[in-house]
């Protein structure tokens, strides 16, 4: 007997140099002896084990690469035996053995899922060895194709789900355009821990636009649904007319109740803009300040940074009143993925771009127009970083509507 190899968790056939373990399920001692002699004649690197009944074979099916199955067993005849093997054999290839008069059963067996069939008395050692090898390789190829297809289906389903969870801003009749970009740091994902939204609401003082942008620490599969929960909760609070000074405490309650770990926290910026008046009220919870673009300058808004959500629930975060001071303005909101990359040439090793560096980038005479600014800014930040940044990035640019502008 050859080397015994534990293959119970192996689904893709033998590795290079590994002996192929074969289970021959055959109740006729003469036929079993002949198969062994044929494989010995071919000097094949096989370890052959024999079972005379399906009951005897069943415990061994998950430990082999290939099953040579006689379709005339005393306790499992015809295709019933094959179905039992396929049910219990996991990743093993199956070749069925038939007599000359039962060749039609071999063809039917391949249709049921066997890799091949062999007619007793018509094969020599070389052809039997080759049939077993090919069966194992076909099974491995089929299994890899199945796993690939399952992976593609899961990715497509995940993409549809994530795409459905991305925000659809409610801009209403606000005379402004909102341009955005969202890029998760996680490979092949559509959704990360960053989140944003926009809701226009009519009130006694006219229409106001409520903006949200935030970042759950991290950018993995746990942070993404938490970011969605916070965004949806914020939208519900705004649409319900909850007073602005109660919104962040309510979001913090959602965060604390929904997070899977006490170490998870979130930074948030909420902004209420009166577009016609050119003013805004801003509250920050540990989030970098919005940047006002006006008169060719880029200036961080003067807002207290506040404490991140999830550390000291219930703490007050004051609002700041900001006047844009001109009819030609744009307001930039962003997550820290935009500023935590490298500062670029001439900087100290490890120095981050930061808010000041971002303002310098925005002061460039080549700065893109608001419509293209989110994508342009992402390219500039990556150029300073020397490549893509690893964190999620979300960017919002709000700009008063002009005659040639369009809502994003």
Image (cartoon, rainbow, N blue to C red):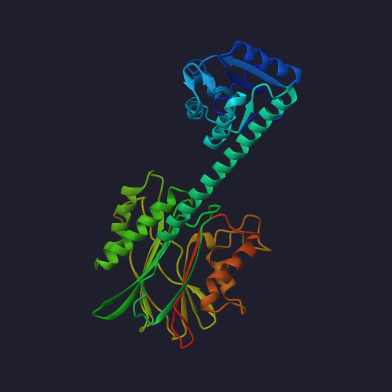
Q: Is residue 272 toward the left or the right of residue 192 in the image?
A: left
Find residue 3 and report its horizontal and vertical position in percent.
Answer: 66, 16
- Above or below 182: residue 52: above
| Residue 282 falls in image quadrant | bottom left
Q: Is residue 377 visible?
A: yes
Q: Quadrant of residue 212?
A: bottom left
Question: What residue sits 59% from the left and 29% below the top?
Answer: 103
How far across and down, in percent of the image, does residue 226 sit? Answer: 39, 52
Q: Quadrant of residue 376?
A: bottom right
37 shown above or below 380: above
Residue in the picture at 68% in, 64% down: 345
Location of residue 261 in the rendering, given as x and y in whole percent from the top left corner? 39, 43
Q: Residue furthest bottom?
A: 403
Is 201 displayed left or right of 367 in the figure? Answer: left
- Relative depth, front residue between 97 and 58: 97
Residue located 27% across and 77% down the image: 202
């Amino acid at each position: 007997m050859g080397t015994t190899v534990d293959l119970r968790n192996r689904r893709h056939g033998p590795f290079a140099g590994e002996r192929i373990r074969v289970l021959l399920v055959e109740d006729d001692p003469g036929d079993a002896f002949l198969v062994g002699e044929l494989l010995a004649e071919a000097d094949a690197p096989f370890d052959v084990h024999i079972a005379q009944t399906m009951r005897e074979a069943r415990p061994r099916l998950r430990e082999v690469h290939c099953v040579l199955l006689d379709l005339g067993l005393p306790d499992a005849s015809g295709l019933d035996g094959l179905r039992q093997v396929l049910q219990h054999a996991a990743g093993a290839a199956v070749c069925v053995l038939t007599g000359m008069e039962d060749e039609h059963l071999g063809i039917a067996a391949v249709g049921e899922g066997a890799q091949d069939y062999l007619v007793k008395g018509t094969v020599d050692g070389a052809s039997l060895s080759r049939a077993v090898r090919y069966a194992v390789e076909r099974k491995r190829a089929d299994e890899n194709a199945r796993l690939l297809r399952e992976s593609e289906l899961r990715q497509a389903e995940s993409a549809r789900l994530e795409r459905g969870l991305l925000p659809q801003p409610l801009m209403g009749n606000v005379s402004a355009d909102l341009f955005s970009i969202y890029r998760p740091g996680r490979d092949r994902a559509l959704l990360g821990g960053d989140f944003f939204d926009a809701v226009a609401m009519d009130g006694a003082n006219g229409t106001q636009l409520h903006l949200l942008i935030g970042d759950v620490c991290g950018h993995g599969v746990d942070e993404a649904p938490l970011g969605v929960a916070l965004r949806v909760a914020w939208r519900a609070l705004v649409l319900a007319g909850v007073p602005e000074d109660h919104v962040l405490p309510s979001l913090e309650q959602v965060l604390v109740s929904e997070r899977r770990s006490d170490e998870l926290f979130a930074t948030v910026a909420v902004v209420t803009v009166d577009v016609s008046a050119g003013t805004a009220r801003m509250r920050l919870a540990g989030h970098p300040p919005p940047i006002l673009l006006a008169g060719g300058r880029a200036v961080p808004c003067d807002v207290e940074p506040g404490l991140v959500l999830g550390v000291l629930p219930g703490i007050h975060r004051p609002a700041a009143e900001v006047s844009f001071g001109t009819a030609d303005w744009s307001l930039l909101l962003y997550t820290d993925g935009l500023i935590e990359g490298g500062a670029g040439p001439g900087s100290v090793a490890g120095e981050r771009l930061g808010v000041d560096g971002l303002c310098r980038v925005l002061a460039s005479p080549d700065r893109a127009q608001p419509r293209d600014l989110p994508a342009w800014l992402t390219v500039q930040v990556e150029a300073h970083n020397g490549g893509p940044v690893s964190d999620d990035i979300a960017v919002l640019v709000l700009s008063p509507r002009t005659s040639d502008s369009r809502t994003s």
